[in-house]
């Protein structure tokens, strides 16, 4: 055999070895590539069902809105600093002389069915929600909306509206006109098209029975495909255990486990105090219709005992002015009710009650109240506590007979809505965002679905006027003065009594690829849950100045393919042997 023949044989053997190595390496690499292409985030939740994730069918608490917000985008949004950042609108302006808001939309946004998002969709959404009120947004001050061109919309105001940007710009989900113009009753609309939005994720499945939600990334999202392929909510009795067992990537945890989970490699984040446990009051019943009696209740309640016993110290007493003491809008000198049971007894006696054998009576009838309790907690997580027991002991010490009735949170909510209660231990967020929350939690928004968190209290003309002023005062300094005074009057009238702010903790797996965060003031209009969708539009580190786009895989750049190192080696060796064979006779 000639030397050239030997060289060719050797070259063939080397090529075969390189090719075999490449095949083996590819087989080893395939699972890794497959996993990277199908990465998912699983969020643990122990309540499960928060309604269908469409604007009108999501349950009227924060978790319901969050299930929907992954699918439907708003005009603007809030990052973790609470600064407004562009979403469907790339820029905007307000012209006070004309009382008009102008939004210029991005020109590449699409609905999940491929249709383009246009200014007509925004104008349609305004008209539709004025006709079919959407509980999360007030449009009373909006006159009309007009599409100037394909990507420019003007929203004309009939009156000034201070919380416009957070409330309408950053909370109102934009609807696709080509679908919703045929929907006569949005509360009955559960067809597949009801879940077509323009957000970063597409709806895949919701199981009402199992309380699970599944979404998949929208490849053509106008801000770039999310760095998560699938987002899944899983219902579990113990969210912390699900996290530790690897069944979830984000979960609420017990506060005293924060250090342990940190040592296990999880990232633990402590939430601001944007959620309050409160006492809802049926002020249509005697003696709860009396301001004096409600004030007596406030003096009866020892907030520190709730914090120490129910929260084990992980929280703090709440302001009686509703707005969170962590908020920039909080009045530092709001009217307070320090624990004073003797004063409470005097006030109750002033209403004609007599204290006999430790129990107040009037006209031979004992002063007794029913208290509805549930395991409601922030973020929709059911948390066992001692609130009912603590409240019962405190009120009975001053002579009020208490019957505790324990029910599921949604049943308590419905009873409150139906006025079928005396007192109810409940809770809600939103108290760290725009002070519009004072309006929403006192006065039922006209034409909207009744909220279990709203006192529906209209017995104070002074409070009503202040609430109206804080909605329309556009001067920031004057508005703050109004908000401070509204908190004082709220604390005097006590439509509801805030008990405490829990310090809640979440933990997440950093290896899953998402850095979760709490949004200052809360997500959207104040939801105090660390599930801002912007977190999944970033790489695994917080960016500065808006959304940090994730690196996208490319197919036209050869250096991104795993075959290239092997082809390079093969090319070098082949060239070497060919050159060598040519040199030798």
Image: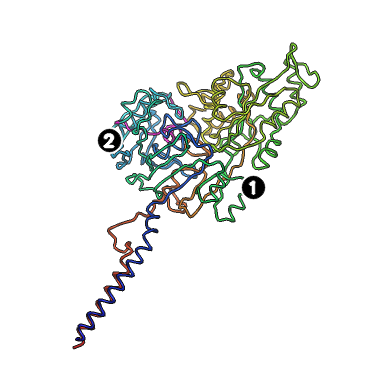
Residue at (64% x, 17% y) in the render: 289
Residue 407 rendering spot, x and y as whole percentages: 59, 28
Residue 434 shown left or right of residue 197 in the figure: right
- Mark 1 and mark 2 lie on one chain; the one further toward the N terminus is 2
Q: Which residue ends up furthest to the bottom in the rendered image?
A: 585
Above/below status of 196 relative to 20: above
Question: What count of labels does the image hold?
Answer: 2
The image's mark for residue 286 is none
Residue 391 rendering spot, x and y as whole percentages: 69, 30
From the image, tell me which residue sits under label 1.
Answer: 256
Which is in the foreground here, disc 1 or disc 2?
A: 1
Residue at (27% x, 34% y) in the render: 149
Q: Tell me the chief SS of the magenta region.
A: loop
From the image, tell me which residue sits under label 2.
Answer: 150
**Quarter containing the N terminus:** bottom left
| Quarter of image, res 128 | top left
Cα distance between the residues tagged 1 and 2: 54 Å
Residue 46 shown left or right of residue 579 in the figure: right
Residues shaded magenta:
159-178
Q: Is residue 171 magenta?
A: yes
Q: Which residue ends up furthest to the front in the rendered image?
A: 1
- In this rendering, does residue 488 appear at all? no
Residue 124 shown left or right of residue 356 in the figure: left
Residue 397 rendering spot, x and y as whole percentages: 76, 27
Say what secondary structure mark 2 lies in.
loop
Viewer-nearest residue: 45 or 367: 45
Residue at (48% x, 55% y) in the render: 511
């Amino acid at each position: 055999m000639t030397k050239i023949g030997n060289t060719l044989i050797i070259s063939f053997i080397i090529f075969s070895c390189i090719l075999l190595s490449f095949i083996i390496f590819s087989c080893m690499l395939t699972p890794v590539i497959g996993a990277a292409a199908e990465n998912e985030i699983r969020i643990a939740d122990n309540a499960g069902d928060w309604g269908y994730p469409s604007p009108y069918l999501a349950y009227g608490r924060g978790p319901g809105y969050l299930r929907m917000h992954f699918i439907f985008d708003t005009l603007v949004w809030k990052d973790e600093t609470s600064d407004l950042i562009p979403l469907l609108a790339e820029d905007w302006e307000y012209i006070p002389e004309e009382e008009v808001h102008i939004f210029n939309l991005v020109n590449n946004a699409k609905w999940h069915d491929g249709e383009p998002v246009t200014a007509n969709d925004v104008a349609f959404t305004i008209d539709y929600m004025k006709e079919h009120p959407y509980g999360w947004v007030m449009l009373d001050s909006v006159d009309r909306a007009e599409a100037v061109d394909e990507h420019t919309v003007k929203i004309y105001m009939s009156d000034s509206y201070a919380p416009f940007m957070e409330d309408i710009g950053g909370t109102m989900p934009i609807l696709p006109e080509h679908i919703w113009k045929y929907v006569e009753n949005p509360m009955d609309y559960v067809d597949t098209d009801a879940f077509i939005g323009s957000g970063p994720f597409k709806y895949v499945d919701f199981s009402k029975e199992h309380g699970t939600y599944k979404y998949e990334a929208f490849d053509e999202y106008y801000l770039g495909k999310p760095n998560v392929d699938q987002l899944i909510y899983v219902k579990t009795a113990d969210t912390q255990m699900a996290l530790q067992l690897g069944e979830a990537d984000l979960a609420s945890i017990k506060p005293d486990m924060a250090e342990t989970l940190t040592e296990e490699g999880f990232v633990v984040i402590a939430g601001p105090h944007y959620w309050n446990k409160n006492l809802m009051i049926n002020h249509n019943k005697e003696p709860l219709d009396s301001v004096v009696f409600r004030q007596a209740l406030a003096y009866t309640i020892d907030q520190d005992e709730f914090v120490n016993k129910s929260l084990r110290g992980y929280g703090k007493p709440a302001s009686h002015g509703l707005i969170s003491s962590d908020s920039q809008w909080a009045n530092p000198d709001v009217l307070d009710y320090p624990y004073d049971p003797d004063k409470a007894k005097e006030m109750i006696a002033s209403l004609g009650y007599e204290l006999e054998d430790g129990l107040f009576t009037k006209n031979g009838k004992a002063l007794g109240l029913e208290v509805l309790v549930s395991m409601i907690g922030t973020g929709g997580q059911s948390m066992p506590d001692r609130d009912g027991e603590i409240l019962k002991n405190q009120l009975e010490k001053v002579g009020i007979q208490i019957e505790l009735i324990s029910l599921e949170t949604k049943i308590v909510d419905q009873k409150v809505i139906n006025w079928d209660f005396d007192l109810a231990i409940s809770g809600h967020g939103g108290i760290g965002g725009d002070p519009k929350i004072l309006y929403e939690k006192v006065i039922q928004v006209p034409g909207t679905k009744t909220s279990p968190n709203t006192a529906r209290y209209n017995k104070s003309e002074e409070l009503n006027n202040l609430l109206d002023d804080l909605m329309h005062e556009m001067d920031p300094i004057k508005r703050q003065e109004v908000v401070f005074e509204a908190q004082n009057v709220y604390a005097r009238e006590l439509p509801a009594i805030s008990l405490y702010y829990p310090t809640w903790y979440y933990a997440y797996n950093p290896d899953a690829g998402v850095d979760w965060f709490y949004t200052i003031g809360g997500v959207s209009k104040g939801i105090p849950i660390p599930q801002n969708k912007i977190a999944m539009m970033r790489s695994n580190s917080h960016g500065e100045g808006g959304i940090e786009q994730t690196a996208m895989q490319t197919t036209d750049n050869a250096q991104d393919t795993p075959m290239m190192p092997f082809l390079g080696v093969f090319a070098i060796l082949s060239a070497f042997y060919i050159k060598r064979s040519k040199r030798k006779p």
